[in-house]
Amino acid sequence: MGADRSKYDATPLDPNAGGGGSDSAPPTFNGTVPDVHVAWGSPPPVVADTSKGNSSDSIPPEHNAFKVDIGSIKESEQGMLSAGSIMVDAYENLKNMVLSSQEIFGQNATVTTTRQGNQAAASGAQATSDTNPSPVQDAAKQFASYIFPAEENVLEQVADSLELIGQLVAAFNGAAQAYATADYKSAFPVPAGY
């Protein structure tokens, strides 16, 4: 096994082959990183729809009895709202951190070189220093051009997931409202012989 071969990787990447990264264009982000918030602090009250509507003349279909625990639905809803609120706060903190740290990878890094010769040190003379761009700047700028759009895409995907959680909470609330309305509009069947 040669000096450049690893005993752990039988097929290592050829360091001279390049990775295609320098030949490909950086990804783009065409959206806007969304702001997310929780619309409800607590679930809205469950209120039956008492309007007559167009179906007042029709006879409702018969159905066997069933039991719905509205309180359990509301507890689940509140639990999802509380968890959603925590997730939204964490998302907003992460989003603010990502968007405020656009130069974190060393795109503007510098190197300061300080010189003080032996003769100058003995006489108490000031040292001289030069500040120059760091050799990592080019690589950092290239890396940043790839990572920032990727970070923004991930933030958008997380925001989309939080939106779906909100839609689930709204569906739970809609189910509770529908059950309350069904209960309000229920009727006992007319006894036989009347």
Image: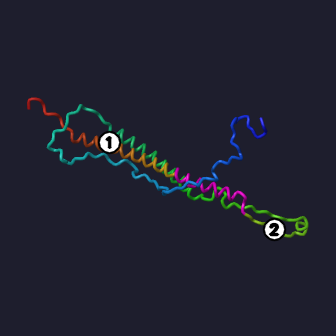
Q: Which mark is in front, 2 or 1?
A: 2
Structural crowding at the residue carrying mark 2, measured as other residues with C-alpha within 10 Å and reported as few (<14), some (14–19) or many (≥20): few
Q: Main structural element of the magenta stretch: helix, strand or loop?
A: helix
The dot on residue 128 is 2
How far from the left and from the top, in percent, is residue 29? 52, 56
Say above or below: 74 vs 155: above
Q: Identify the amino acid type marked 1.
A: Ala
SS at circle 2: strand
Residue at x 23%, y 42% (from the top left corner): 184
SS at circle 1: helix
Residue at x 69%, y 46% (from the top left corner): 17
The dot on residue 175 is 1
Q: Identify the amino acid type marked 2.
A: Thr
Residue at x 64%, y 58% (from the top left corner): 141
User: Over which residues does the magenta segment extend?
Assistant: 133-154
Q: How many marks?
A: 2
Front-most of residues 50 and 58: 58
